[in-house]
Amino acid sequence: MGTFAHAGVHADRLLPPLTLRRWVKTIAVLIVVSFLGLLICLQYGTERIPFSRMLHLLAGSETLGSTGLSPGVILWDVRLPRLILAFLVGSSLATVGVALQALLRNPLADPYILGISSGAALGAALAVQFGVSWAFAGFSAVHLFAFVGAAVTIIGIYHIASADGRIPVQTLLLAGVIINAILSALILFITSLSDSTSAFRLFFWLMGSLATLGYAGLLALTAYVVLGILVLFGQARHLNLLSLGEEPAHGLGLEVEGVKRVIFFTSALLTGAVVAVSGLIGFVGMIVPHAVRMILGPDHRLLLPASALVGGTFLGIADTIARSLLAPSELPVGVITALCGGPFFIYLLITRRKSHMG
Amino acid sequence: MDIYYHLDQVSFRYSDQWVLRDFSLDVREGEILGIIGPNGSGKTSLLKLMAGLLQPQVGRLSLRGQDISTLGARALARQVAVVPQEHHVLFPFTVAEVVLMGRFVHQNGWGWESPEDLRIARAVLQVMDLEPLVDRTFQELSGGERQRTIIARALAQQAPILLLDEPTAFLDIKHQLEIYATLRRLNQDRGVTIVVVSHDLNLASQYCQRLLLLHEGRGFRTGSPAEVLTAENLGIVYGCEVLIDQHPEAGTPRITLPALVSVGGVFKNDTRTTLF
């Protein structure tokens, strides 16, 4: 222990740990870096569009070509919506990952841990199997069936896990695992009945894909996702308290059961929508929260928005690599997220071993 | 003096085994009440009932006249601060962050700590001798440092009632003494009402004004340390022979274990209920 004179200065300097100033600075830096990173991503694809030309196209100072796949059309109708989708999906996965790791008191939790993803997958499998082809508000039948599947699963898991108005975290995890197992069996059953084309379509959907959603769908999804993420941001201090355990959190004045319900339903509804439009993209929801926590600390007021920005940018970059690496063919983006995220995480673990996973 | 806690014929069980039976107790404003008794006598359950973490199946438990089951967590936390027996902090929060969480009940919304929050956090960090550790993460601390951090967090809550479950477990004698001296100071200077579960009969004897001796889920004796801590009472409840004389300074009962253990039953080392 240090001397007292020193200690006094020490304490003054270190209280409060998170100031508004530090928050604004960190978030501002992350916004700038994210924006630049995504702008650079837009150049790449099957065909590279030089940066200066791209800026002209984006600024509208160069008219869009009217024929075929001009750079303008590629940029506006293919790359930009896809990049926005990647950002939304990545942000949601990372934010939900942060929330669930604290809620379930499990540092290895990710958005898929509650089994909602297999509900979405079952919905998608049914849509593919029965060849449902109508669309609504920019979303395909597969998207909508997947979302309904997720929503039904959420209600099911909640009812299984809740006992006299409480949702014990361990039961919630178990309910997720069991529902997951049952639904996976059903998915296998359906795919084994289907022909190889449908099976392949479903397989590709499950591997995770950010194939384009039109601007109408994108707009609806943006509103939905932003709302969900903001609700979770609002739970930041509650998540801090929940990290201490439910009984201590209650003792400190947190209405634990209500907060748990808000976090569960928001996380579940976000996961359902994200899985519906993008399938299963692994690693983002688990790795990004850890990496950000190791660097910026565990305070959820900073951790949540920072993870949302980092998660979105990370998935944007990963998807760009997935599209460009073997162009014109495309890799599943999950391959890239695992190959980039995994080693980076190992690097963080080794260099910051002291800062512990919790 | 007001009655803070009023327990009327309270019975509580976890599954089919009653932990507390027909238990009645009043906790008065401004007192230091020590709860003592052997392992499994219901001490921690009683404290958790008072903290609103458990609800009795039978009987009524009220806090300042209000049925405790009708109080929300926030209303309760404004009146009662709890120091639990075990603490796990999931993520690498620092000592300063953990202590500031004690201010939650006084804060609104998403915002940042007010100057008042920071002033109080600094003061309790100083009281608990934690200043050199502010930027250490909770996981890096020793058992005693963790205990002091959690007590500091409870003090930051500034509630008129403080419930502590084994606050001096894991602490060395200097910090044991400091914890009890701090509790006494809070009690005398600020009128904080304190209920403390303790396995350390001597500290309880020295610092508590009133003791409650629990035996198999019932109150065996309640009264001043001199009334409760007799060789006869302790012999019945703990099933073990003790020697009792007077504390050389305070004059309160002092309990010593005999040099040769001559009890018929099994001798239980009763200084700790759980290790981490």
Image (cartoon, rainbow, N blue to C red):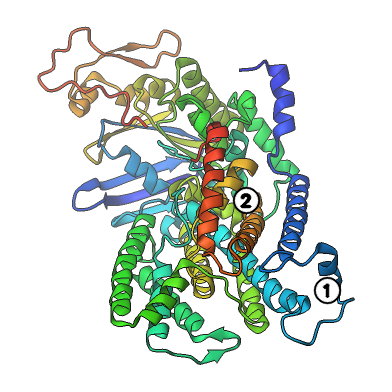
**x and y percent of residue B243 in the render?**
25, 12
Q: Chain of mark 2?
A: A
Q: What label sits on residue A303 in the rendered view?
A: 2
**x and y percent of residue A40 in the render?**
75, 60
For the question of whether residue A284 can be seen, the reply is no
Would you say B75 lies left or right of B96 here? left
Q: Chain of mark 1?
A: A
Relative to B44, is B182 above or below?
above
Would you say A321 lies left or right of B168 here? right
- Quarter of the figure with residue A19: top right
Would you say B53 lies left or right of A55 here? left
Marks 1,2: beta carbons within 8 A: no
Q: Residue placed at 36% from the left, 63% from the top? A: A176
Q: Residue placed at 59% from the left, 38% from the top? A: B99
Relative to A25, is A6 above or below?
above
Q: Residues within 10 Å of mark 2 (few under 14, many from 20)?
A: many
Q: Nearer the viewer, residue A173 or B82?
A: A173
Relative to A256, is B131 above or below?
above
Q: Residue placed at 43% from the left, 27% from the top? A: B208
Tag 2 secondary structure? helix
Outermost residue to the right = A61
The mark lying in front, picked from 1 and 2, is: 1
**x and y percent of residue A241 in the render?**
54, 49
- Quarter of the figure with residue B124: top right
Q: Dot 1 corresponds to which residue?
A: A57
Say what amino acid the circle numbered 1 marks. Answer: Leu
Say what amino acid the circle numbered 2 marks. Answer: Leu
Tag 1 secondary structure? helix
Q: Nearer the viewer, residue B242 or B115?
A: B115
- Quarter of the figure with residue B152: top right
Q: Residue placed at 70% from the left, 33% from the top? A: A14
